[in-house]
Amino acid sequence: MLEGENELNRNLMFPIFFLLGLLLLVVDHTGHSLGDRLFLSLGIQPWTGEHQSGAHLSAIIGIALLMMGMMCTVTYYKKKLPSIFAWCLLVCIAVYGAFPYAAEKTMFILKQNADGVNSMDYSVKDNSCHFQQEEVEEGDGKRNHVFCNVKLFNYGNAEHVNIRPLFPYYYEVSDFAPATVSVPPHSTVTVEFELWELEGNDMHFSGWIENMEFELTPATAPGNLFG
C-alpha cells in the first residue's frame, strides 16, 4: 500500500514540476516573465548582477523544472498514454499563447478601481527611445534630447502619470525630468513624449534603444502634457 502511494506521489510530482517550470517562464502582456515578478514579490532579485546582468535565476530554475518535469512525465506516462510528449508540447504552446491575453484581462479586472500610479503599467517589449545630443542655447553647452514612445496600460481610474526612461548603466547620461502623459482610464494606448537631459554632457549619443525600462510616478496636475 505504502509503495503504491509513493509511486502515485512521484507520478503527480513530475507533472507539477513541469507546470511550475512553465509558469516561471511564461511572459505576460507587458513583456515581463511571471518568474521575475514572483521573485521580486518575494524580495529576491531575478538576476545575480545589477541592471539585468549575470545569471537569470528565475529562467534557470524555470528551464530546469520544465525539462526535468517534462522528461520524467513522459517516462512515467508513455506506456498508458503514448502521445504524452505531444500533449506536453501542446500544453506549452497553449499556455505561452494564451497567458499574455489572460494576464492583461485579469489585471483590468483586478485593478479596475485603482488610482494613481498603481493603476498604470508599461510594456517593456513595445517601446523605443531615440536620442541625440543637441545645443540647448548658445553658451549653455549640449544636452541629450530624447524622444520616446511606449505602450501604457491604464487598468483603473488614473488620467495622468509621470514617466521617464531608465537608461542602461553603460550609457553615461545624467538625469532626466519626467514627462507627464495623459492616458484615458481603463485603456491601452501608445504615448509619445520628449525629454531633455537636466545637465550638460560632453558625451555624444545618437541612436535608438528598444525594450527599455521606465519609471512611473504619480502625477497630480499635468504640466508639459503629452498623450
Image: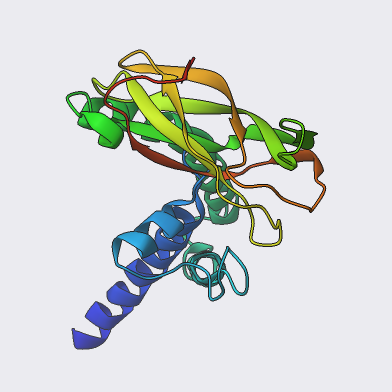
Point 50% across, 55% down: residue? 81
Count of residue discs: 0
Residue 105 placement, left or right of 24? left
* Residue at the farthest bottom position: 3
Residue 86 placement, left or right of 16? right
Q: Nearer the viewer, residue 47 or 80?
A: 47
Its colouring scheme is rainbow
Q: Nearer the viewer, residue 56 or 140?
A: 140
Residue 116 location, x and y as percent?
A: 25, 31
Residue 43 location, x and y as percent?
A: 32, 68
Q: Nearer the viewer, residue 113 or 65?
A: 113
Quadrant (top left, top right, bottom left, bottom right) of the N terminus:
bottom left
Check the image and report above or below for 63 versus 136.
below
The quarter holding residue 206 reads: top right
Q: Nearer the viewer, residue 202 or 126?
A: 202
Query: Is residue 18 in sight in this rendering?
Result: yes
Query: Is residue 30 in sight in this rendering?
Result: no
Residue 61 location, x and y as percent?
A: 50, 71
Point 26% across, 86% down: residue? 3
Residue 16 location, x and y as percent?
A: 36, 63
Check the image and report above or below for 174 versus 12.
above
Point 57% across, 63% down: residue? 51
Point 54% across, 64% down: residue? 59
* Residue at the farthest front position: 139
